[in-house]
Image (cartoon, rainbow, N blue to C red):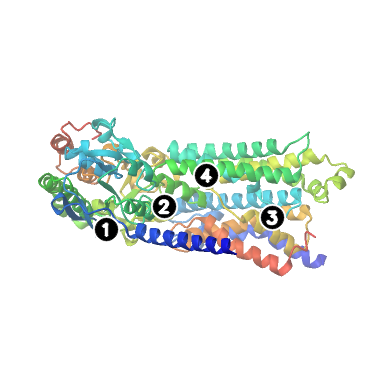
Amino acid sequence: MRKEVVMAIVAVVLIAVATVGAYFLSTWSPPPQSESSTITVVDLAGREVEIPAKLDRVVVLCSQIAELVYVFGEWDTVVGVTKWAKYNPVLSELANFSNVQEVGSASKPDVEAIIALDPQLIITYGGKYGYSTPDSALQAFENVSIPYILVEMGSLEDLYTTIRLMGKVFHHEDLAEDIVTDMQSIINQVREKASYIPEEERIKALWLWSKPTKVTGGAGVTYDLMVNAGAINPASNYTEKYVDVPLELIVSWNPDVLIIWSSASYEPEDLINDEQWQEINAIKNRTVYKVPKIISDTWSIRVCLLQVWMFLKFYPDQDMDYSAIADDFFMKYYGIHYWGEV
Amino acid sequence: MRMRVRPLSIALALLPLPVFIVSLCIGSYPIPPATVIQMLLGIPGDWPRVEWAIVFRLRMPRVIMAALGGIALSVSGASLQSTFRNPLVDSYILGVSAGAAFGAALGLGILSSMAAAQVLAFCMGLLAFTLTYAAARTRGETPVVSLVLAGIIITALFSAALSTVKFFVDPHKTAEIVYWLMGSFSCAGWDDVAWCMLPVGTGFVLLYLLRWRMNALSMGDEEAKALGVDVHRLRFLVLVASTLMASAIVSTVGIIGWVGLIVPHSVRMALRTPDNRIVIPLSACVGAAYLMIADDFARAATGYELPVGILTTLSGAPFFLYLLRRKGVRVWS
């Protein structure tokens, strides 16, 4: 009897200790860094994030941001990077990956590998898309008090905001502003030239994604680019970024130009030789183009070059020198001549 | 009883014809049905060339593909249910769909080629079946239970391999694979009809010729042997024919579920007979009509291209439940 009482007391004490311990662990947070050593930024999800003022250990899960960090000359601060960074056409050519560890991707991050790198900051995609970082991973970063910045690039404006945000994070606000200004300048040149094209001369264009019947709807960066370039997107009535439509609807729209996503599993020739597409003007006129890999990323600063390329595919007679613009841009920001397709 | 069955059988046998014609009149591009009929009858008219192209190049191969898919999945489902003596079996039980899905994922995700996806899906579907059959075969025999279990194991292995591919590829590619898995006739053309015609035609003819032997097999192995049927050879032929048909369809349009369950059961219950001499040909007719109608909804019910696999599942699962609740398994018992 006495033994049972002792065991009960021990059990109660253990439970009490475990409860108190769990409570303290749940409310514990590391001591705050001194104010002068941190800055506060607002990410694309609207979160205020306190990050170290001086960064030398950053994990970047967005290849476009990794590219931007390279352009800022801060590549040495990157200790972990998305596995897709090595497929980025610019980074794969220019960046040194020997001291940078692959840590999965934004949507499937290797959380333990990231934490093991002891980063001061993680930059990744927000939102609830297939490429977004899952909440469970973000929670894990919070649990170990690693700050993270969420970026989303649903439009060109989002992209400009992201570039400025990264300028602030890496203390290159001026360079970030230069990039945005140059991008806007190039895109505005296109918009201005497009604005002079009479309504009746505007072409109808479609952007085709992973399958030929999956097209850009009335939202997203590709939609912005098409509108800027003076094209009419017949699928703009759909509010989605991507929409799968019946092929005969595409035939009824009869687009003059078809632009194919660079990573699509089919080529322009596949459509040109497909008898089901023969009644479409773009097929008859052979105006079907696949976006060159080097300018394919609509969330990269290179998107302004895609804008010019697209405009000239829509209106080949327009007076713009794509090669010169692309070469100037590459020399200024990557320090190398443009080597891609024209 | 006979008087009631005969007109119904004739009606079911003729069903695909009106459905085929109506399906050709349905689509996003507005073409008057009278014009479509005129075109089909070869009556000269002054319709625009684009309308002719829509009917003969877009709609017709797609509708024929849907009909072929319905025939293949229904007939293979009916044959396998009879051969396995199990009403819940369809052509996917042997690992065909999992193998084909893995093949398509390799083609789309790694090789980035639709043509490669189609060929790999077909080959992997056949490979999955071969592995299932080899795994189930012991001492020169292939017991039904072993086949079903081997099918589950091989399906699990290919599903894991599919998940591995999906895990490692770009999220956009993952989306492409997932979309493929839902099944769709959206890109079906005459090339696809040509690709499927031989395996589906061969499989159907073979199963049609074996229909009375399958009746013997459905009574049990011992009874079938007593009737002089080579049970193992017959079962092997049915499996090969069913797999050939299902692999060809799955490799072309993705995974379309429930057709192989719904259609044969509907036919058996409507005609109140498990006789394969009736069930096999009428499953082909009803399956063709069912999938043509499902695809009509997929392409014309909204402004979107809906995956037909979703529609067959949404319509098939409740209908199957209704059939079970209403008539039970009396036809099988």
Q: Would you call the spot at circle 4 few (<14 residues within 10 Å), some (14-19), or many (20 or more)?
A: some
Residue corresponding to mark 1 = A45
Give how far across and how far down residue B121 sits, in percent.
54, 40
The numbered disc on residue B50 is 2
For marks 1 and 3, give the one nearer the viewer.
1
Callout 1 amino acid? Ala
Mark 4 to mark 3 CA distance (whole Å)? 33 Å
Label 1 in the same subunit as label 2 = no
Label 3 in the same subunit as label 2 = yes
Give how far across and how far down residue B54 sits, in percent.
46, 53
Label 4 in the same subunit as label 1 = no
B216, A246: nearer the viewer: B216
- The secondary element bearing badge 1 is classed as loop
Mark 4 to mark 1 CA distance (whole Å)? 48 Å
Residue lying farthest left? A174
Residue corresponding to mark 3 = B88
Whether residue B290 is visible to the viewer of this picture, yes or no, is yes
Identify the mark nearer the N-term, 4 or 3: 3
Label 1 in the same subunit as label 3 = no
Residue corresponding to mark 4 = B190
Callout 3 amino acid? Leu
Identify the mark nearer the N-term, 2 or 4: 2
Q: Are marks 1 and 3 in contact (CB under 8 Å)?
A: no
For marks 4 and 3, give the one nearer the viewer.
3
Give how far across and how far down residue A21 sits, in percent.
39, 58
Identify the mark nearer the N-term, 3 or 2: 2
Tell me the quarter of the image containing the N terminus of chain B.
bottom right
Disc 2: host chain = B
Disc 3: host chain = B
A202, A142: nearer the viewer: A142
Label 2 in the same subunit as label 4 = yes
- The secondary element bearing badge 3 is classed as loop
